[in-house]
Amino acid sequence: QVQLVESGGGLVQAGGSLRLSCTGSGRIFNINFMAWYRQAPGKQRELVAGITSRGAVNYAESVKGRFTISRDNAKNTVYLHRDSLKPEDTAVYSCNSTLRQYPGDNYAQYWGQGTQVTVSS
């Protein structure tokens, strides 16, 4: 069984910074793509940032220049460092990983439980 566990959410003032972490545990052979999504109240879930196993990254336009995604393959962990936070960044942030549990398996997607981030003005 695979679990993704996020940490680092909480309450922060506008302009502040926070770093989210998401670590995979259980039987994992390799992780291909890792990403962070967010869902604000009344809105659809959106992709915030993604990173491939080789380090190629992509960001939503709304967070470019403020958020940085990175990963530690040895720890099966993805990070999201967020600077210059705005009230509109308030959302539940969830990590997503595309991985294989065993060699030869097809890749499958797994989700973390989500962590609340609230940015006060």
Image: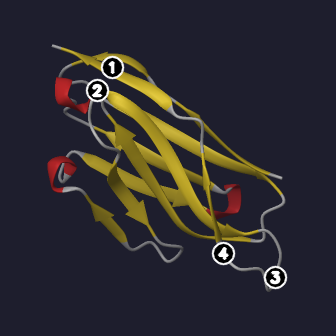
Q: Which residue type carries mark 2?
A: Thr
Q: Which mark is residue 96?
A: none
For the residues labelled 4 and 2, the Cα–Cα distance comes to 31 Å
Q: Tell me the mark number nearer the camera, choosing from 4 and 1.
A: 4
Query: x and y percent of residue 61 in the render?
Result: 16, 56
Q: Which mark is residue 107?
A: 4
What residue sits right under mark 2 in the picture?
A: 90
> At numbered mark 3, what does the secondary structure look like: helix, strand or loop?
loop
Q: Reading the chain from its start, which is encountered first: label 4 or label 2?
A: 2
> Looking at the rendering, in which quadrant would you find the C terminus?
top left
* 5 lies above or below 88: below
> At numbered mark 4, what does the secondary structure look like: helix, strand or loop?
loop
> At numbered mark 1, what does the secondary structure look like: helix, strand or loop?
strand
Within 10 Å of the Cα at label 4, are there few (<14), some (14-19), or many (20+) other Cα atoms? some
Q: CB atoms at circles 1 and 2 under 8 Å apart? A: yes
For the residues labelled 3 and 1, the Cα–Cα distance comes to 40 Å
Q: Which residue type carries mark 3?
A: Pro
Q: Which mark is residue 118?
A: 1
Residue sitting nearer the eye, 43 or 53: 43
